[in-house]
Amino acid sequence: MSEPVAPRRSRLRPLGIPEVRITGGFWKERQQVNAEATLPHCLSWMERLGWLGNFRAVAEGRSGAERSGRVFSDSEIYKLAEAMAWESARSGDASVKATLSRLAAEVGAAQQPDGYLNTAFGRPDLPPRYSDLEWGHELYCYGHLLHAGVAAGRVGVGGELLEIAVRAADHVCRTFADGANEGICGHPGIEMSLVELARLTGEQRYLDQAARFVERRGNGRLADIAFGRSYYQDDLPVRAATVLRGHAVRALYLAAGAVDVAVETDDDDLLAAIIRQWEATVARRTYLTGGMGSRHSGEAFGDDFELPPDRSYSETCAGVASVMLSWRLLLATGEPRYADLIERTLYNVVATAMAADGRSFFYANTLHQRVRGEPLPPDWVSPRPATRLRAAWNQVACCPNNVARLLASLSAYVATVDDGGLQLHQYADAEISTRLPDGRPVGVRVRTDYPDRGEAVVEVVEAPAGESTISLRVPHWAVGRARWTDPDGQSRTALTRTVEVTRRFTSGETIRLELPVAPRWTEPDPRIDAVRGSVALERGPVVFCVESVDLPGDADVDVVRVDPSTAPEDRDGAVAVAGALVEPASADWPYRTGSGGGPGRPAEILLRPYHSWAERGPATMRVWLPTL
Amino acid sequence: MSEPVAPRRSRLRPLGIPEVRITGGFWKERQQVNAEATLPHCLSWMERLGWLGNFRAVAEGRSGAERSGRVFSDSEIYKLAEAMAWESARSGDASVKATLSRLAAEVGAAQQPDGYLNTAFGRPDLPPRYSDLEWGHELYCYGHLLHAGVAAGRVGVGGELLEIAVRAADHVCRTFADGANEGICGHPGIEMSLVELARLTGEQRYLDQAARFVERRGNGRLADIAFGRSYYQDDLPVRAATVLRGHAVRALYLAAGAVDVAVETDDDDLLAAIIRQWEATVARRTYLTGGMGSRHSGEAFGDDFELPPDRSYSETCAGVASVMLSWRLLLATGEPRYADLIERTLYNVVATAMAADGRSFFYANTLHQRVRGEPLPPDWVSPRPATRLRAAWNQVACCPNNVARLLASLSAYVATVDDGGLQLHQYADAEISTRLPDGRPVGVRVRTDYPDRGEAVVEVVEAPAGESTISLRVPHWAVGRARWTDPDGQSRTALTRTVEVTRRFTSGETIRLELPVAPRWTEPDPRIDAVRGSVALERGPVVFCVESVDLPGDADVDVVRVDPSTAPEDRDGAVAVAGALVEPASADWPYRTGSGGGPGRPAEILLRPYHSWAERGPATMRVWLPTL
């Protein structure tokens, strides 16, 4: 099997990558770009910058004085290795397998006899092992090594990679046992990978160590810092927290690991705590795009309803991590709200982060770009997380590798099974062929142009013997408006978040779902001060934006006002809305008695999918549009 | 003479601290608290934390391995020394003089024979001198040493402090001469103090070196960093920049130094460049409070109109620096707009930063506190710049010492003279006794309860022989509404930003100014997205806010809506306005079709001066209030 997440027991059972083939459409295109462009792009940059060479330097016993990259650069190699493992399961491409084996050999050569493996610590001219748990990222790096090892092990590729991971995990269990080093890592992440290794190997000690790391956190073992201990979630025990806070990726990785521990140990209290945190975070600390993290400072969640579009951090990796968390909660509970957030995040964070050609990336994903700026230099290794256009590479390169591993494994997030049947969570042209837990084979084919069009046809290709259920998620914006037609041709409105058809299926039968993807205006909660008096446009799961290149005379987007009392119109992939361009009065002091600004010049405003912005050179852009 | 800034020639001539005595009211109270509480508080913390001990360690030849404090902590001692020099000029207090002499002796004992003086570099177990111009702050520290030396020299106190400063300045001129080390400091500040030392000593080389530092900057001599070179203004030459950008304190110190260089070298182009930058910054990057810097990340200016109240950084030191810049521009040009911004910043940033008791401080000054939080631990040395309540001390303690030196010297910012007469820029109970440039003595007494009340009476105590002019600034919000009465009893409306009375004055004559300090609603420029649909309340120069402790049932401030069509009413130091409390509907996703929230419960809302907030325990607070 080759599932990224494989709980020993859970409400829903995930499918492996070969069981779900995405055969066309939005995500198929991106999976191909990922395979053909992004994976080689990432590898080539990490060779060029010496991050892979760091492993060779250790293997050859060289000093650490000339080590390249940031302290956590090892983890980027591991993320890419994980991506390659999933990609080889997806495509069967022999060259990816060969490259992965080579990577594994390079990594393995740098492992110490006791299992320790890190190029930034523990050798001449570098700090000693575990001398900086706050910022050293050693356990975080193991986390990604273990993910890569599990992926390689499940797919059956990567040479010794799983063995390397097992040796590292055993070293961690010895070193960080109770009574030994009782510390935790400044960056969570190892928790979920230890659980996954326990799932793969059946070894309880990995699960125990993961549970230990989860329970140790939140008691002030790490130093207080300028960002506060909430930065690394060491301010409150996981069970006591009510909302995600601090560094967004850290918070989401920790929560995902806590779900894994809770599921494997039947710890309903812990699971309930994470569900509460997810609910509060989604209700009060999440952007319309699904983006998480509203503070550049500390790459962190803000306070409730602190969601400024122009300073949306919405780190790409936080989007990936949010998908990882929601997927675990979906498996644990079966509730469609988690798949809703996954969909929103995929279309509006993950798809936005990567350029169409797969060779440049946003690290932070703003919802409002005020300044046009200059084109970026080609082949620029950005020292900054936030760039106005996608950068070819970044000194902190977590995001490209993280997107790569998610895209390569994306088919695993499309559907699940349970004792009763099959659940479809995401809509894409796909062929699904698996078995129900009781062994009955089941196969379906999905045909759709979603999200461009709302129709999805699910055809039963191999009907399970006896009665079974096919469930289709109805996104929250479609409830009460979507229509569906059962195999007998009877049509109904979908009144709940799931459509279920239970019957003795026969091959060739179809269920037809019609989701209302017409463009719609969306208003923000009045507590989100930063977008008061503004609306956004959504179409199906896709958030739209206005970009200066689509305005008359390349006007700045800040002059746009829209009239949400008029209906938006589809216009060949874009959406046209009625509005005006209002040139503000100039003023030497921007606060006065009585407001400025006239009614403006009426104009039709063209909006395009947010994920497609910044592909046409420097531009200003906004998602939230002030109303007339 | 004891002016903080003493141009050799300028449009207006500043007065020394003993020439202007603030005798009562708002600022007199704060000057007394500063003298009695803040100066001893700062000294005691810096003793306790070992920052003063760092100088002893150098003097005793000890290793740097156990050095205390951040790399720039020397500068805090120098800021406090400067404050003590001004304070001794203000009060003549012998104990302050004695303490300052002791500080000077401690500092002097750590100076190297070649003039080098820094406790964080250049000795065993510490990095070599000038090995980290980006972050080392060595030249920045000299800047404050020179300021302290100049203050001590002008006031005639501080033992050897001026000589220490001169030796350090000579060392800097040798080390950073053209052809030697042609670097610049990652933190500007030395430029203005070199000019001031040139003014005091008449030595041209200090001015030349200041000009060199100004001209070198902006050519990428410092490394590119995550914040970008704009962080330390090394992205664009000073003359080419159009607006202040990057780290706010750095930007403002640099601009102030550039004005000093421009004034002393008759460089009108350079002066014009800074005036343009000031204008653009005030029009597009300044908070209603006068606060500057809207990004926590990099403590930096944001893009134009990026002014979120809930993430207002508005660093206290940026407020102090803004006063320093505007004061230089006021002296150079005589234009009242600079005094307007000084007044706004004093009442709403500087006065806010310091607690009423002078023993705790805001480092960052938010305009919207969303979370109530817990009381701070007593005697807490905050590792964070942004705290919910004022902290007793901070690991980066620039702000308390910076406020202390400004308050001690505040009387110097009240009035100036020129060939024609005397200009009154700030309104406070004061006695002013000086000479016009031609030698004619002049004395006035100001009586006022400003800003509580709008009346100020200026009485001529010593009339200059012959004709002269007394000018009174009319704040921009008072133009067209203020009334003034000349010595003959004739009243007029003030139609311009200055009231001027030219005559042969006789002692006992008065000019009476009535400023309209009734509370007024203020609307933001529509380009400030973060406060769209909101208004603020001002009363004279004072910005008001609502604090949760003043709401019925200690409600959260985010439920407040106000009705700006009704007139606000003075209510015993506070202001009452009509509005409503709107409890938001709870939602599991904060974006929807059709808005939520009902009309709310009508309520009278009590507002208080922003500078007085957070004195009654944890609270939520906001300056910008959504309208009904």
Image (cartoon, coloured by chain):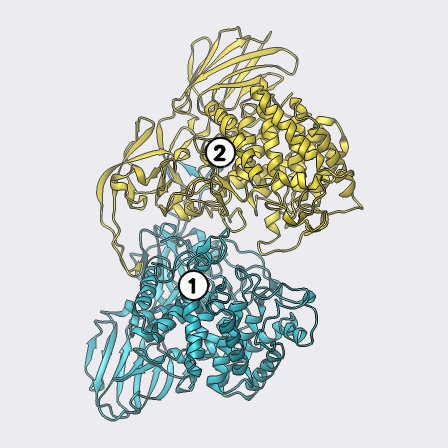
Chain colours: A cyan, B yellow
Are labels 1 and 2 on one chain?
no
Q: Residue at label 2?
A: B350
**Residue A209 horizontal side relative to residue B109, left or right:** left
Q: Amino acid at mark 2?
A: Val
Q: Residue at x 39, y 38 (%)?
A: B614
Q: Nearer the viewer, residue A599 or B512?
A: B512
Asked which secondary structure carries label 1, the reply is helix
Residue A255 sits in which quadrant?
A: bottom left
Location of residue A627 in the rendering, given as x and y in whole percent from the top left corner: 35, 52
Residue B453 sits in which quadrant?
A: top left
Q: Is residue A128 above or below residue B212?
A: below
Is label 1 or label 2 in front? 1
Location of residue A133 in the rendering, given as x and y in whole percent from the top left corner: 53, 62
Q: Residue at label 1?
A: A216
**Residue A249 horizontal side relative to residue A453, left or right:** right
Q: Is residue B553 above or below residue B230?
A: above
Q: Nearer the viewer, residue B469 or B530?
A: B530
Location of residue A425 in the rendering, given as x and y in whole percent from the top left corner: 33, 77
Label 2 packing within 10 angstroms: few (<14), some (14-19), many (20+): many
Q: Chain of mark 1?
A: A
Q: Amino acid at mark 1?
A: Arg
Tag shown at residue B135: none
Q: Residue at x 45, y 56 (%)?
A: A220
Q: Is residue A387 above or below residue B482?
A: below
**For the residues marked 1 and 2, what is the alpha-carbon distance in whole angstroms?**
43 Å
